[in-house]
Amino acid sequence: MAKTRGLLTGPDLNEVQERILMNTIIDEQVEQFKKSDEEFERQLMIHRPEVWTQIQEEREEAEEMGFDEIVWKSPESMEEFEEIERLVMGNEFEPDNSESVTNPTVTYFEGINLDELGEEFA
């Protein structure tokens, strides 16, 4: 509705208007892609039915095998994470077994002498 009213065509948009415009543009591009993909399949079915049939068979096979879904999973324990790292990186990965807390090398107070601020900031 904002696009129809012309609220997203102004020279200086605020942050909300910019995000709405970005989402609108992305939605339009997705719809355009879907239409062009459907048109491509239609043309392929008309002019090269054997290729279209082969593509459909491969899609059905992928669906049966579960390749059409992506399942995001994260390790449930540190041991599982380390095992995944060993598999991915080979035998090079050695987990850090130190229980000490590491301090960040760069902080927001880099280069500031905290003693000069006084006791209430220390």
Image (cartoon, rainbow, N blue to C red):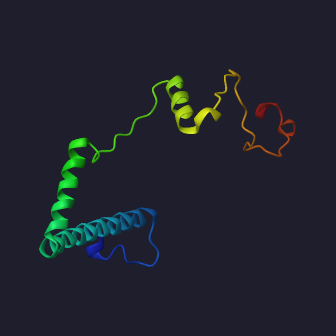
State whether residue 61 is above or below residue 88: below
Relative placement, left or right, of 86 versus 63 is right
Relative placement, left or right, of 36 versus 88 is left
How far from the left and from the top, in percent, is residue 108? 72, 44
Residue ID at (55%, 34%): 85
Which of the 4 image quarters holds residue 95?
top right
Residue ID at (68%, 20%): 99
Which of the 4 image quarters holds residue 53?
bottom left
Relative placement, left or right, of 64 versus 106 is left
The residue closer to the viewer here, 12 or 93, is 93
Residue ID at (87%, 39%): 116
How far from the left and from the top, in percent, is residue 23? 35, 63
The residue closer to the viewer here, 64 or 2, is 64
Outermost residue, front direction? 50
State whether residue 89 is above or below residue 56: above
Q: Quadrant of the N terminus?
A: bottom left
How far from the left and from the top, in percent, is residue 80? 49, 26
The residue closer to the viewer here, 64 or 1, is 64
How far from the left and from the top, in percent, is residue 49? 13, 69
Disc tally is 0
Relative placement, left or right, of 8 versus 56 is right
Q: Quadrant of the C terminus?
A: top right
Residue ID at (24%, 72%): 36
